[in-house]
Image: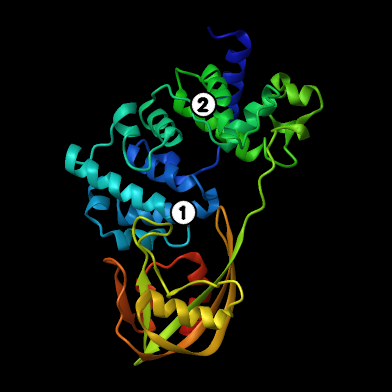
Amino acid sequence: MKTPAISAIQRKLTDWYVENRRDLPWRKTRDPYRIWVSEVMLQQTQVQTVIPYFNNFVTAYPDVASLARADLQSVLKSWEGMGYYARARNLHRAARRLHAETHGRVPSNWADFRALPGVGDYIAAAVLSIAFDKPYAVVDGNVKRVLARLSVVDAPVNQSGSMTVFRKMAESLLDRAHPGTFNQAVMELGALVCTPRSPSCKTCPLTAYCRAFLSGRVDAYPKKEKRKPVPQYHIAAGVVEKNRRLLITRRSPDVMLGGLWEFPGGKVRRGETAEAACVREIREEVNLAVAVESHLTRVRHAYSHFKIILDVFRCRYLSGRVRRRGPVAHRWVSYRQLDRYPFPGANRKFLHLLKE
């Protein structure tokens, strides 16, 4: 049963949202496909970064059918720079399934939409509530932070076991008459006002109901578990040149960064120099004998669960014919052709040196 406090929170938060929400392109449509694309992009990427990617993506692929018909390489190229490429691969797979099974119609029910590749509870709740007014509460990082402060929740927000606690709270607060608007309002409050550091409590519409604010403990919430140190790996890669063409290889579609192209290489073993590792990895990975000519650059790059130090070498082809394990593609490309291929972030950090 809705209490007076819950009714007041819903009203105040919705009124605040109507007055203060950001003018974002995906808020100008009720098209479930476009809302879906935006939510997939926003899962791991900041809003300002997403805006140009979203606009370019829906221009290139304006509906499910056009995305389904597109080549995965083109889709990955459109996604290049945002990272977390499994999002793009899953979105492409889901579009192909819908194109074949529903003529491109996005499902409006939980079971069918949730069953699509890459669609988890958050994506399903966001799209179904915003596009179809279905009464599902969203729970993301912003929402958990707002709820943790509102009700002084001691459950750590970064612990998977805490999700049940926050989901129940979100469902109890949800305005079921306007679920899409309310969900966006909570997320917007977390993004603009109830921020991780230095929250703007003076401009928050919920201070009268926020137990952390009323008790002077805003900085104590949300609670977080300390994470283990992120491991770091030393990688060596080689830019192999043969007849003014460079060797690039495509990662298997079922691994991290699947479908993207890269320069061959791998981990440096203990006691091994980066130069030796480069020669060894190229021999093992693509069956070529090469000689290191020079050190091109060192790149540092961070992923979600580890970091790498990447030493890149210019290499001269000596002998051999490319042979890879499994049906993984390779190409000998000109310098100008590099722009046609989607590369991981670590590789993109030194591509400009090759073009120069």
Give the SS element for disc 2.
helix
Give the SS element for disc 1.
loop
On screen, residue 93 versus residue 27, left or right, reads left
Looking at the image, is mark 2 or mark 1 earlier in the sequence? 1
On screen, residue 298 versus residue 261, left or right, reads right
Residue at 25% x, 57% y: name it.
70
Cβ–Cβ under 8 Å for marks 2 and 1:
no
Q: Which residue is mark 2?
A: 182
- Colour theme: rainbow
Mark 2 vs mark 1: in front: 1
- On the image, the x and y values in percent for residue 329 come to 29, 70
Residue at 35% x, 52% y: name it.
89
Residue at 78% x, 22% y: name it.
214
Residue 96 at least partly seen: yes
Q: Which residue is mark 1?
A: 84
Q: In terms of image quadrants, where is residue 218?
A: top right
Residue 18 at least partly seen: no
Q: In terms of image quadrants, where is residue 264?
A: bottom left
Q: Nearer the viewer, residue 199 or 140?
A: 140
Cα separation, mark 2 vs mark 1, equals 28 Å
Which mark identifies residue 106?
none
Q: In terms of image quadrants, where is residue 328?
A: bottom left
- On the image, the x and y values in percent for residue 103 come to 18, 40
Instruction: Give the residue type at disc 1.
Output: Tyr
Q: Nearer the viewer, residue 253 or 85?
A: 253
Instruction: Give the residue type at disc 2.
Output: Phe
